[in-house]
Image (spheres, coloured by chain):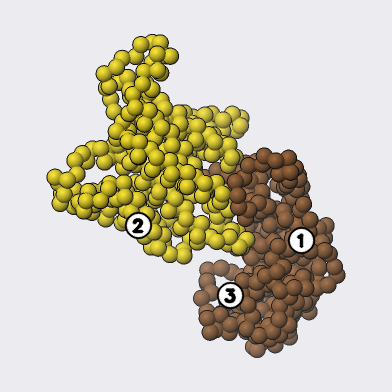
Amino acid sequence: MIEPALEETTNPVIELDSATVRLGGRGIFSDVNLTVGPGLLVAVLGPNGAGKTTLMRVILGLVRPEAGTVAVLGRPPAQARPAIGYLPQRRGFDSSTRIRGIDLVRLGLDGARWGVPISITSNARRRRRIETHRIEEVIELVGARAYAHRAIGELSGGEQQRLLIAQALVRKPRLLILDEPLDSLDLPNQAAVTALLRRICTTQNVTVLLVAHDVNPLLGYLDQVIYMAGGRAMSGPVERVINSSTLSELYGAPIEVLRTTDGRVVVVGQPEAPHVHGHRHELVS
Amino acid sequence: MSTRLSLDPISDLRELFAFPFMVNALEAGTIVAVLAAVVGWYMVLRRQTFAGHTLSVMAFPGAAGAALVGLPTGLGYYVACGGAALFMRRARGSARRSYGTETATIATVQVVGLAAGYLFLSLGNAVLGGTETLLFGTFLGVSRTQVLALLIVAAVAVTLVAVSARPLLLETIDPEAARARGLPVAILDTGFLLVLAAAVAATSQITGALLVFALLVAPAAAAQQLTMRPGIGLVLSVVFALLIVWLGLGIAYFSIYPVGFYVTSIAFALFLAARLVRSIRTRRRAR
């Protein structure tokens, strides 16, 4: 009943072919070519306003490119929708929200289902049992069993994030898209959530595409990065993209990528997009 | 009421049902209890209690305005509540429920509503008798027609909520996820406010503009103190509301004090009890 929405293949999960996107008359990016394979952990990086969120919305089929083609799992994005799990940018739950984590995960399965939610027929009851089993399985997978029955509002940011990931995973998507999943988490939780996403990629054969502010918590886990700047995008393994020459070419300005002794990456000299919050010290943004 | 309690519960009950006005009151109260409990459960979870309160206040200018221009009072309730609901939704625009701006808008609507009601009342002084009835209800003056009208409104409203139970829950807890799942978030949001307006308009004709709250908030809030499960919470909310109405009407029949007083007091006591149970449970778990 909760089968993967499309059969598994080794074909690319995401393919953009010279895609150009304009929003409200403003060019967001143009002539972007991208290929993302199955079961990979991919980060979308770049300064604010470079079009990271727009790229997600294109892949989700919410924004259509003006030119070029986009294919997700070999079909138009809107048709691939059932096979995509999506986690919007982190939203905290009010501390008094009286709903359990497990109910939040269940809504991932049946939250879009209309009709009176009472299972009377034996078929409906069987379906409910299968769904309950799947919910327990996915809660186990994200390691949230200890607190899945507590009120979501009482949980920490990291715990809420795990349950939201479970909610996005419960329908067995082939592609999981997360918008800033590490934002507003503390460092240990950033590391834990990143490790969890890596594990999901490998064990569930799900492609995970996430937007990130800072590449550093993800270093060592990523298969591929997509770096967006100046209306263009570069894609490839971390070392091939985040280096002085590639980023200088992308920005059209001299950029220096430094590595600290503990392996962290610092990008120096990037021209900031307007409306950047100055209060935040960002390493790679 | 002039009757006295006889200590024989069976004959007391028989006496309760002997009068048509009492039967009407019990039927109307039962319908209103179910409606208010179901809609109220979502309202409390959505944190739209203040919006609900403002809608109930709108019943006042609605009734006074209808009396002024010579329309049926009931119609005035629905027009004023529905209009206020749409206005509040529009004023909020597409912005998500951010409480700072939303509460300011709602408060403005409330003040304008009260002012308009007061104006209508003074303009049509001779036409509308009984401001007290308007504010505190006419439990014991419900007609057959009113019962029927209530039944229809309640059936439609409860059916709408039941059919969209899960999408509405998802939209309530996590609007972003609901949007990503392709749910019509704006329609759900506006639709719920309109159902809430209908529930308030229907309920306040019985309980009065000020006491709607006893049935809309207290049962739902008490249920949410006791359980986090959506299904059980909804059932519990309905049970509490029925308990409040039946007990309130029953006691008021044998007493000299108004129904509204008993309904509100029982509702408040129930909420307190639920809070107490929850804090005891929390403490026990912490130990």
Tell me if B130 is positioned left or right of A92 in this view. Answer: left
Hue used for the chain lettered A: brown
Q: CA distance from mark 2 to mark 1?
A: 44 Å
The answer to whether residue B197 is above or below residue B238 is below
The answer to whether residue B251 is above or below residue A201 is above
Which one is in front, B194 or A273? B194
Q: Nearer the viewer, mark 3 or mark 2?
A: 2
Q: CA distance from mark 1 to mark 3?
A: 33 Å
Tell me if A44 is positioned left or right of B141 in this view. Answer: right
Horizontal and vertical percent for residue B112?
27, 55
Mark 3 and mark 1 in contact (Cβ < 8 Å)?
Answer: no
Q: Which residue is at a point 52% across and 29% down the rendered structure image?
A: B277
The circle drawn on residue A5 is 1
Q: Please tell me whether mark 3 sits on a helix, a strand or a loop.
A: loop
Q: Mark 3 — residue?
A: A48
Q: CA distance from mark 3 to mark 2?
A: 41 Å
What amino acid does circle 1 point to? Ala
Q: The residue marked by circle 2 belongs to what chain?
A: B
What amino acid does circle 3 point to? Asn
What amino acid does circle 2 point to? Gly
Q: Mark 2 — residue?
A: B83
The answer to whether residue B206 is above or below residue B7 is below
Q: Which residue is at a point 26% across and 18% down the rendered structure image?
A: B2
In the picture, the quarter occupied by the C terminus of chain A is: bottom right
Q: Please tell me whether mark 2 sits on a helix, a strand or a loop.
A: helix
Hue used for the chain lettered B: yellow
